[in-house]
Amino acid sequence: MRRGFLLLTLALPLLFVNISSAQSLRLGADVGTVRQMGETWEQWEWGLSLGLNGMINITNNILAGGRLGYNRWNPDDQEFLDVFDDTLIDPTVEGRASVFEIIPFLRFTTGMEDRFVNAFGQLGFGLFIIDQAVTVTGTFGEEVENVVFGPGRENRFGLSFGAGVSLGSARFFTVDIYPVFNYVFLPGSDLRYLQINAGVSFGF
């Protein structure tokens, strides 16, 4: 009796899952632009975002997946030089900010295979590998100054959420357009950035 109850409990979720959809695999890639936000957003230019996504259908309307992403920004040189009030002679600004993402996520979609346009929302939580450091070098008086801004490399966890549209056949091929907001938990000052992505995905 107890074993039968356990088997029934484990089987109940299957009543709500489309078995044929559960076998559906989607792979995709996207490219986009990315902008840091928050207190230090003016110090960075618009950057580049690249991503690879893999998803499987849990139901017709819910997909579970993962994302490998890479984001990179170059510094706005003048914003870093303004800190010194023109006291440095022949200054140079070197460095960049980058974030590598490993993010499991859930995607909630209208899931209408016979429609050309489907909307979706996405929520994820994962690991963000951050490398953020800028070095300003110049001469102050008779001495050469090297000032480093940024914490360097850190591994932190954070949230990722966004929404968008898929154009095409959800069963075979789609073009996906979606902004994603990322919030990374850092000590002192959290990292926030917005991606605007466009990509393609294929169904198998």
Image (cartoon, rainbow, N blue to C red):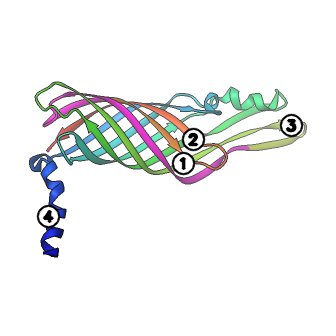
Q: Earlier in the sequence, mark 1 or mark 2?
A: 1
Residue type at tag 3: Phe
Q: What element carries label 2?
A: strand
CB atoms at circles 2 and 4 under 8 Å apart? no
Nearest to the eye among marks 1 and 4: give it.
4
Q: Name the residue under label 2.
A: 191
Assign the N terminus to one quadrant of the image: bottom left
**Relative depth, front residue between 99 and 164:** 164
Determine the CA span between mark 3 and mark 2.
Answer: 32 Å
Residue located at (18% from left, 63% from top): 9
**Relative depth, front residue between 107 and 138:** 107
Decide: few, some or many residues near mark 1? Use Cα within 10 Å; few <14, some 14-19, many ≥20: many
Which disc number belongs to residue 130?
1
Residue type at tag 1: Ile
Q: Which of marks 3 and 1 is nearer the N terminus?
A: 1
Q: Residue 16 in the image: state x and y as whole percent.
A: 16, 49
Residue 45 lies left or right of residue 161; in this view the side is right
Residue type at tag 4: Leu
Q: Which of marks 3 and 2 is nearer the N terminus?
A: 3
CB atoms at circles 3 and 2 under 8 Å apart? no
Determine the CA span between mark 1 and mark 4.
Answer: 46 Å
Q: Which of marks 2 and 4 is nearer the N terminus?
A: 4
Q: Name the residue under label 3.
A: 140
Determine the CA span between mark 1 and mark 2.
Answer: 9 Å
16, above or below 171, in the image: below
Q: Range of the magenta residues?
A: 148-176
